[in-house]
Amino acid sequence: MATRKPTAKSNVSAEELQSYYRDMLLIRRFEEKAGQLYGMGLIGGFCHLYIGQEAVVVGLEATAKEGDKRITSYRDHGHMLACGMDPKGVMAELTGREGGYSKGKGGSMHMFSKEKHFYGGHGIVGAQVPLGAGLAFSDKYKGNDNVTFTYFGDGAANQGQVYETYNMAMLWDLPVIFVIENNKYAMGTSVQRATKSPSLWERGAAYGIKGEEVDGMDVLAVKAAGEKAVAHCRAGKGPYILEVMTYRYRGHSMSDPAKYRTRDEVQKMRTERDAIEHVRELLLQGKHATEDDLKAIDKEIKAIVNEAAEFSKESPEPALDELWTDIYA
Ligand SMILES: Cc1ncc(C[n+]2csc(CCOP(=O)(O)OP(=O)(O)O)c2C)c(N)n1
Ligand SMILES: [Mg+2]
């Protein structure tokens, strides 16, 4: 991964930087709490944490407006929080409780919010990519200027359906931003082992789709690239690809022996490239916040996450007759 490039900071306000710090910290603390609840046996099934990748979704959400849509894979809690879904409802869904977004019947990978235009949460690798193009198609058909952020991983980028989607998206000039979250691994397989051409965004060139690589550990760089992509889509110029170089600190899911990378590699990323630390430094160095201001934000976030955890424990399990609702047959 490229070393951090200096980002233009002069035009970033204290409020803006503080909001990125707050939003990224919420995701990190929420995920840490989810990991704890999983360890206590309160969360069942799969649980894929987003820790390390926070700047990707926070930077891109900073470019979104009301009406824009988002869809992603199973590593989805960060996307939900960043688009404004209620941490209580997300956590309660993780613990399988009535107060969860899918009434406790969906779990980590199956949550949606019509209100926030969040369309999941998809466990089949790459499946959300054509669905994202479909969402963009609906906006194009209605004639508005909404865009759809379609997130997928480096592993998913090797799925055939991604390229069928690229073709249709370009053919019909769909307002879809394909966001490849390149965290260097697909479960235990590194990009180098699985991919001949290391630059994933460049594959869009075969379809005439513009794109670029972005430093995903720098929220300002993500936002700047996002703004370019969003402007392109809103102007009716068709799809855009952002390959955002990021890193996940935790295992692929909660059960991961992590034999495919060294502890040193993870530690190096954490100490040298952490996106939250980066914004913390910008805030302090630019005198946009004091240590006390940051402590107050930390406290505020901790309270939100604790409240979500309490809610997720106290909310009852779904009633038995819920077995017969929200089903096709
Ligand atoms: C079609 C399909 N094949 C395989 C799997 C098993 N699987 C789940 S996640 C994953 C890795 C995907 O990696 P990537 O797209 O890089 O996303 P990341 O987990 O890094 O966020 C695989 C192979 C699956 N869920 N669906
Ligand atoms: Mg990956």
Image (cartoon, rainbow, N blue to C red):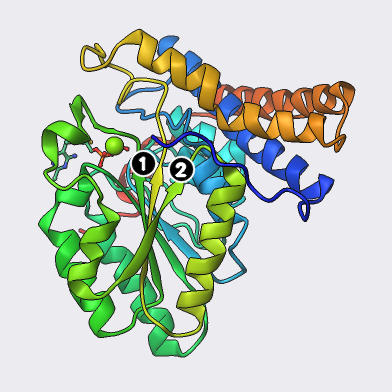
Q: Residue at image x 55%, y 27%?
A: 274
Residue 202, percent across and down? 26, 59
Residue drawn at x 53%, y 32% as measured from the top left: 91
Left or right of 18 on screen, residue 23: left
Residue 188 picture location, percent across and down:
20, 24
Count of all numbered marks drawn on residues in the image: 2
User: Does residue 246 appear in the picture of this structure?
Assistant: yes
Residue ID for mark 2: 103
* 133 w.r.t. 63: above or below: below
Q: Where is 165 relative to 10, above or below?
A: below
Front-lying residue, 305 or 196: 196
- At horizontal 38% and vertical 70% (from top left) the residue drawn is 176
Residue sitting nearer the eye, 26 or 227: 227
Which percent across, then down, holds residue 104? 43, 37
- Secondary structure under badge 1? loop
User: Would you say the residues marked 2 and 1 are in contact, meaning their CB atoms lie under 8 Å apart?
Assistant: yes
Quarter of the displayed picture in which ligand 2 can be seen: top left
Q: Amino acid at mark 1?
A: Gly
What residue is shown with label 1? 106
- The three-letter amino acid code for the residue at tag 2 is Lys
Q: Quadrant of the C terminus?
A: bottom left
